[in-house]
Amino acid sequence: MQATTTSFGIEEALEKLGIKDLNHGTSTGNKWFPGGEEIASYSPVNGELIGKVTTTTKEEYEQVIVSAQKAFLSFRAMPAPQRGEIVRQFGNKLRELKQPLGKLVSYEMGKSLQEGYGEVQEMIDICDFAVGLSRQLNGQTIPSERPGHVMREQWHSLGIVGIISAFNFPVAVWAWNTALAWVCGDVCVWKASEKAPLCSVACQNIIAGVLKENNLPEGISSIINGDYKVGEMMTTDTRIPLISATGSTRMGRTVGAKVAERFGKSLLELGGNNAIIITPTADLKVVVPGAVFGAVGTCGQRCTSTRRLIIHESVYDKVRDAIVGAYKQIVIGNPLDEKNHVGPLIDKDSVDTYLKAIEKAKAEGGKVLVEGGVLEGEGYESGCYVKPAIIEAENSFEIVQHETFAPILYLLKYSGDVENAIDLQNGVAQGLSSAIMTNEMKEAEKFLSFAGSDCGIANVNIGTSGAEIGGAFGGEKETGGGRESGSDAWKVYMRRQTNTVNYSDELPLAQGIKFDL
């Protein structure tokens, strides 16, 4: 588990992305505002200061919203395929800047370089998806019960979409929302996590150039920066019909209540407590990489990270030993070095949460199979590098019932039929991602049935982590119920309208009602 040190050209990447020592954190298109206080962004990779951004003042926020309102009036009138062309150009810019943006994601957030590149690739993929979607925002024709009448359903642009994103995917989740919202004719205002604010500045620099080249209104894309108080400006603002918020369940409760209070719409992507069920017929060649990457990828800081392995008692010892053995091969260190598998946690607060969770699990009776702890020494100076831990536990443990955003994997044992495992998997408050490893068709189908997994994502013979943009992404219960990305998730960014047209010479009423004058 030794770190390695290499030069990766971060300075060059920052220069290509227009990142300075001090960056304005508020923008509408190419227009930047001076801002108020400063937020310093320190890399969890080495603890060094990357740069600073200024926070958004109330006055600047008001200017951003007014600019967005004005831009919406003209942008919604642009034909959807033309809006798709703008998204296509944005996707091409991302292709050109994939390497520097991926490096910034890795350096500011701490995920591996390959995951950083992969996150930018997700942005490119959702742009491609949205371009095709721009010609498929279809309504439908509905049979009318009245002669000489036709009913139609159509979709209209919604307005301003407020986006609140989390640090763990500092660019992809924004793109999931913006790419779809833009082709739908909406304009976007983004508040990024204050733990990774430079990524928002970099993305705004990229889209601002596209808007300028096409002579489009600046308010189509805006960013604001700051703590939760800046986010509250959006959640309480009646001029923003939709708030898309990604983060903890605690945050989601607050956002959801605030938005509902003003009868706005919210798209919530909140916590996960994801499990993989491992049945007697499971193939270890599939189980081990799926479980290990799910548990330690992004240092356990994905909402889809694997938190629990639910293993049948007949194969428990074999699976346990294989997973423990695989953990011995994990290399922890600078995530910009592609030889390393796991980078740091985002900050020391997360390290503290990780350590307390391990102690809590021990206090509740958990048996530690792979010791955790904080790594020290050369290459670990930031104090954010930790060891992935494995703990034998019970599903009823309080700490197992909660999501810990860190690389802690709990092993649980089940006996009997797969229904018992499904009950354990569903026996938590969260409902994001789930998986079963089995070669038994009946078990797989039970897992996918109405009586199976209660999660928004249910996989067979792949892990819980890593979703393609073609399918709708999101979960149930305390995960919030929102859906982003593929399938028909675009509908949340639009308002539905039902039309009835009478092309006859009479006025028959619905339900056969007579009203004679």
Image (cartoon, grey):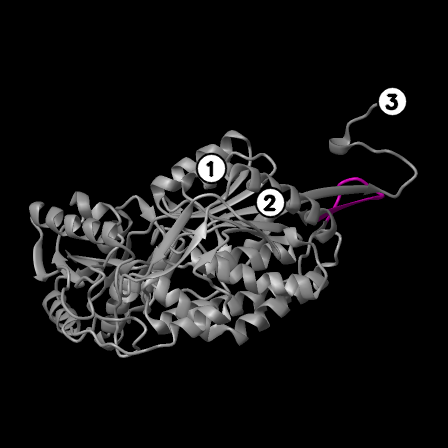
Q: Earlier in the sequence, mark 3 or mark 1?
A: 1
Give me the disc on residue 64: 2
Q: Secondary structure at mark 1?
A: helix
Q: Which residues are magenta?
A: 142-153
Q: Residue at x 9, y 52 (%)?
A: 366
Q: Quadrant of residue 438?
A: bottom left
CA distance separating discs 3 and 1: 54 Å
Q: Which mark's residue is nearer the viewer, 2 or 3? A: 2
For badge 3, the amino acid type reads Asp
Q: Residue at x 26, y 59 (%)?
A: 345
For badge 1, the amino acid type reads Glu
Q: Which mark's residue is nearer the viewer, 3 or 1? A: 1
Q: Secondary structure at mark 2?
A: helix
Residue under pointer 3: 516
Judged left or right of residue 199, residue 155 is: right
Magenta stretch: residue 148 in it? yes
For badge 2, the amino acid type reads Val
Q: Are marks 2 and 3 in contact (CB under 8 Å)?
A: no
Residue under pointer 1: 232
Q: Quadrant of residue 22?
A: bottom left
Of residues 406 and 499, the one drawn nearer to the viewer in this rendering: 406
Q: Quadrant of residue 332?
A: bottom left
Q: Residue at x 26, y 73 (%)?
A: 341
x, y percentage for residue 284? 21, 74
